[in-house]
Every structure is written in C-alpha cells, then in structure tokens.
Amino acid sequence: MRAIITHHPSCEVTRIETLSDQTIFHLETGQSLRVGMTPSILGAKLKIDLSQSPSSLRTDIFCHPFMSRSVWEVVAPIVRAHPDIQRAFDGHPQLQALGRLSYDEVLELPLRVYITQALYLTHPFNFVCKATNPKLVPQTTDYWCDFMDGDYLVKVVVDLQSRVVTVR
C-alpha cells in the first residue's frame, strides 16, 4: 500500500492501526494519516482486509499535505470573519466550529474520506495552492479549500496576496 502526498515522493504504509472509531495509516516517513472512519466500514468500502500486511494491499492513498503556518496565518482570520464565508457556514455548526480552532487543533482532526478505486483523504480545513506545482513555479497565489458538512459543500478560494475571497 502506497501513500501519495501531493508534490512529495510516494512512500509505503508500514502499519495500519485499527481503533474502534478510526483507522491510522503509519507511513515509512514517520508521518501518520488518521482517518475518521471505523476500520470495518473503511475496509468494506475499499473491499480489503485492513488486518493484512500493508505491503500485500493493492490500494493507494492520495492526500494533500497540510497547509503551512504561513498560509494558515492568512486564511484563518479570513475564514473566521469574512461575511460571505460566515453566511455560507450559517446553520452548519460543524463548519462554524472549524473556523474557531487553532492550527494545531485542525491538524489533529481526523481526515475525511473519499473512496473510488483508491483512498482519497482530505483535511477538513486545508487551503491548497491551485498551482500545478508551487514548489517549482509559483503560478498563482490562489488557495482553495472545500468545507463539508455531510452533503453540504462550501468552496472557498483566497488569494493570499490580495486577500480577495470567492465563495461558492
């Protein structure tokens, strides 16, 4: 089982920890990916046995890295105070609560899951650069985040330089 984290070399999953309410994938880099889904449900959806050795599983994990503190320092105050974002979050206490968390608290939240032929993981509050590879050529200063509460989706784009916000 491989973990492919955007703009980083892929790495192997060395161990799968199955807890009663979540599944933790331990990577050879020392990083761990904590998924907010029970092992029985996750295994059933992926059609794999999570008790097997990760090296025998043929499912890949895809994930964006968590945003840097410098990105957080720009976007967090915007998410907390921007009227269009607050209007979109109205009636969704889970989304409103995300805006009040600190960087470290958001980093500790379990990852959201999307399953197709592979396992796609996302942080519930994570602004990602829209550039193809910002490490090579910073093509844009636009960063996006999908905020979800069940089936309710709010797409937010923030230009880190101009602080212009788009909410869909």
Image: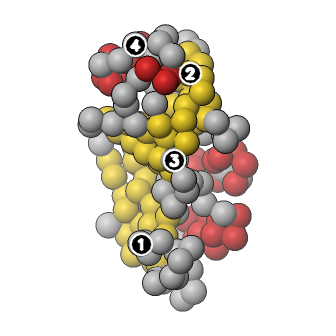
Q: Which mark is residue 16?
A: 2
Which amino acid type corresponds to the residue marked 4 in the rendered image?
Asp
| x and y, in percent, of residue 135 in the image | 56, 73
Res 72 quadrant in image:
bottom right
Number of disc labels: 4
| x and y, in percent, of residue 59 in the image | 37, 31
Numbered disc 2: secondary structure: strand
Mark 4: give few (<14), some (14-19) or many (20+) Cα within 10 Å: some
Q: Say which label, 1 or 2, has the lower sequence index.
A: 2
Disc 1 designates what residue? 132
Disc 4 designates what residue? 49
Which amino acid type corresponds to the residue marked 2 in the rendered image?
Ile
Q: Say which label, 2 or 3, has the lower sequence index.
A: 3
Question: In the picture provided, is 78 more to the left or to the right than 1?
Answer: right
Q: Are marks 4 and 1 in contact (CB under 8 Å)?
A: no
Residue shown at 72% from the left, 49% from the top? 104
